[in-house]
Every structure is written in structure tokens, then in C-alpha cells.
């Protein structure tokens, strides 16, 4: 491992369960002991090798079949480009079908992660195709995209289960809100729509203001919804919300492809970038 990668890994460890399916299940079990639900994601994206995709499918199927045995209340979350979208939508659908079959047998909830804007249309199409066959299926929508207002309303119209996030991908100004203030305002606007008209949705943010607003909206509009957090971030909120009897899910990534995920997490927070800088300086000293 290069020095930079070693230092990054030291920081990334807090957000990732480990390399294997068992590592992910152990992390899910420990989340469950804290009365959190788990959402397991195998790291890796933009796969074009069918051999690599086969491994991804086998692991998701193993996870889905393990929840009952491990006594975990869990879901899985899949990136379309890790199961074939970078080859073709047909390939992705064919592979997704296999996962959905197992999930249906085991009654496990499946989330579709949303990737960069070049895949938004395809991901929504995949959702449409499979939601009609399996209702325990959710999709992430990103508040940084200007189109999301329309997507959200369309999807709510068909009874979709939506995870609202700010969006982790760098997007162009003609299609995306670029400042934190604009993204936050759009998130709050979309979140209000979810509370007024949504069906089993998730508020996935670590932002204090948004979490507080969601709690107050939930008093006015009692809805089936949950808070979702990434593993290793904002423990204090997870504890507090569970104590207040809200449903809290923890998104638990595992696997050896930890770098792109970790870089997105580092970029999200100035303190993480500073931590990276100081760790690099320290490692040069020894
Ligand atoms: C469960 C879950 C699923 C997600 N799924 C997707 C998806 O499918 N597609 C997608 O594009 N994005 C996804 N994301 C990521 C999301 O889009 C944001 O990039 C990420 O959540 C950071 O935005 P934020 O809402 O936490 O707010 P921010 O404005 O980024 O952060 C608000 C505050 O939260 C805390 N915080 C945020 N990030 C960190 C961090 N890395 N380390 C420590 N503290 C932090 C800080 O206190 C910060 O001030 C998901 C996020 C979650 C929680």
C-alpha cells in the first residue's frame, strides 16, 4: 500500500465494517444490540467484469439469507453499477432480479443507492420495473439535483419508498444546487413533501438542523419513516433518536473497495480533511 492509501485506510476504518460478509454481519449484529436496524452495502462500483459482478451477487444473496440466522433486522443497499449497469441496463436488471428473488423469499428490504446524475434515469427505471414485483424496495433521491422535486413527486405518486439524501457526487451547476445553503433548503422542501404525502420513507442525513426539523415534522404528520445514518458518524444522534423511540438504521459498508467511498466521506467534512493532513504529517515523522 502507498503511504497516502495507508493513512486514508486508518481514517476510513471507522466507517467500514471490514473486508468480508461476516465482518458486515458482525457490525450489523452490534448495531442491532443498540436497537438499530442495519443496511449492508458491499463496497465497489462501476464493475464491468462479469466475474466480479458474480461475486457481488453471491455475497448479497448470502447476506439476505443470513439475517434470520444471525437474528438481525437488516436490509441491503445496492449500487446499480456494481451489478452490471456499466455493462447495460439489461444486464443490471437480470442480476437485480436474482437478488430480488432471494430478498422476497427472506422478506428482506432492498434499497437502491443513487449514483451520479448520468445514472439517475436508469436507476429510476430499474426501480419502476422491480417495485411492481416487490414492494419491499426503496430508492435514494438526492436533494442536490434540481430534477429531484419532479422525481420525488412522481415516485410518491406510485407509492415508492424513498431515502432522501443530500447527494455525494460532484454535479454541474446547470443540473445541481451547488451551495450548502441551497442544497439544505431543497432538502427541507423535499422532506416536507415526504412528511405530507410520503409512504415509508427515510431521512438520511447527519445534519443537526435537518434531524431536528424531521423530528418536529413527525409530530405534525405522524408517518412511518426512519432516520438513516452512515456507520461511524454521529453516534450521539443515533443513541438519542433510539431513546426517543424513532427507528434508526445504520448503513454498513464492507469490502476491500473502500477507497472511493472513503474519499466521498472525507470530502464531506472539513475536519476529516484536516485529520487526513495531520495523519500524513505524523506518518512522515515516523
Ligand atoms: C444512510 C445513508 C445513505 C446514503 N445513500 C446515498 C446514496 O444512495 N447516494 C448519494 O449520493 N449519497 C448517499 N448518502 C450520502 C449523502 O448524499 C451525503 O453525501 C452525506 O450524508 C453527507 O451529507 P449530510 O446530509 O450528512 O450533510 P452535510 O451537510 O454533509 O453534513 C452535516 C453535518 O453532519 C456531520 N457530517 C457529515 N458528514 C460527515 C462525515 N463524513 N464525518 C463526520 N461528520 C460528518 C457534520 O457535523 C456536518 O457538519 C447517504 C447517506 C446516508 C446517511
Image: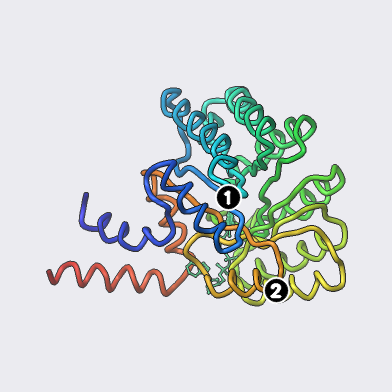
Q: Is residue 187 above or below residue 117?
A: below
Residue sitting at 83 percent across and 61 percent down?
A: 223
Classify the position of ligand 1 by quadrant: top left, top right, bottom left or bottom right.
bottom right
Q: What element carries label 1?
A: strand
Q: Name the residue under label 2.
A: 244
Residue at the farthest left position: 286
Residue 149: mark: none
- Residue 218 picture quarter: bottom right
Does the numbered disc 2 mark a residue whose Cβ is under 8 Å from ligand 1?
no
Q: How many marks?
A: 2
Tell me where residue 280 appears, x and y as whole percent.
24, 67
The quarter of the picture where the C terminus appears is bottom left
Tell me where residue 201 appears, x and y as whole percent.
75, 55
Task: State yes or no: discs 1 and 2 in contact (Cβ < 8 Å).
Answer: no
Q: In this view, does 21 lie above or below 88?
A: below
Residue sitting at 22 percent across and 49 percent down?
A: 1
Tell me where residue 179 appears, x and y as whole percent.
60, 69
Does the numbered disc 1 mark a residue whose Cβ is under 8 Å from ligand 1?
yes
Residue sitting at 64 percent across and 44 percent down?
A: 111
- Camera-nearest label, 1 or 2: 2
Tell me where residue 53 appears, x and y as whole percent.
47, 28
For label 1, count other residues whose C-alpha is less than 10 Å away and answer few (under 14), some (14-19) or many (20+). Answer: many
For label 2, count other residues whose C-alpha is less than 10 Å away and answer few (under 14), some (14-19) or many (20+). Answer: few
Mark sitting earlier along the chain (1/2): 1
Q: What element carries label 2?
A: loop
Q: Is residue 5 left or right of residue 27?
A: left
In whole angstroms, how far apart are the C-alphas of marks 1 and 2? 21 Å
Q: Which residue is more in the foreground, 68 or 181? A: 68
Residue 39: mark: 1
Q: Is residue 20 above or below residue 57?
A: below
Colour convention of the picture = rainbow
Amino acid at each position: 500500500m502507498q503511504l497516502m492509501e495507508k493513512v486514508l485506510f486508518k481514517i476510513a476504518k471507522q466507517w467500514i465494517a471490514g473486508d468480508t460478509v461476516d465482518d458486515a454481519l458482525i457490525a450489523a449484529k452490534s448495531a442491532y444490540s443498540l436497537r438499530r436496524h442495519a443496511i449492508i452495502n458491499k463496497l465497489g462500483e462501476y464493475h464491468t467484469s462479469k466475474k466480479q459482478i458474480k461475486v457481488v451477487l453471491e455475497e448479497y444473496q448470502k447476506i439476505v439469507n443470513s439475517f434470520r440466522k444471525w437474528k438481525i433486522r437488516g436490509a441491503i443497499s445496492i449500487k446499480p453499477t456494481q451489478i452490471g449497469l456499466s455493462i447495460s441496463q439489461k444486464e443490471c436488471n437480470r442480476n437485480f432480479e436474482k437478488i430480488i428473488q432471494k430478498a422476497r423469499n427472506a422478506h428482506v428490504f432492498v434499497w437502491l443507492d443513487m449514483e451520479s446524475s448520468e445514472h439517475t434515469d436508469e436507476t429510476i427505471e430499474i426501480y419502476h420495473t422491480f417495485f411492481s414485483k416487490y414492494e419491499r424496495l426503496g430508492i435514494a433521491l438526492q436533494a442536490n439535483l434540481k430534477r429531484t422535486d419532479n422525481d420525488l413527486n412522481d415516485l410518491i405518486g406510485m407509492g415508492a419508498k424513498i431515502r432522501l439524501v443530500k447527494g455525494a457526487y460532484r454535479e454541474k451547476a446547470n443540473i445541481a444546487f451547488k451551495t450548502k445553503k441551497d442544497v439544505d433548503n431543497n432538502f427541507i422542501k423535499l422532506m416536507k413533501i415526504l412528511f405530507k404525502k410520503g409512504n415509508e420513507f427515510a431521512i438520511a442525513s447527519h445534519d443537526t438542523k435537518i434531524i431536528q426539523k424531521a423530528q418536529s415534522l413527525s409530530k405534525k404528520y405522524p408517518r412511518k419513516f426512519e432516520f438513516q445514518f452512515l456507520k461511524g458518524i454521529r453516534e450521539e444522534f443515533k443513541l438519542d433518536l433510539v431513546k426517543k423511540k424513532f427507528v434508526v438504521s445504520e448503513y454498513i459498508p464492507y469490502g476491500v473497495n473502500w477507497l472511493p467511498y472513503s474519499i466521498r466521506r472525507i470530502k464531506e467534512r472539513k475536519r476529516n480533511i484536516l485529520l487526513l493532513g495531520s495523519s500524513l504529517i505524523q506518518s512522515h515523522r515516523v
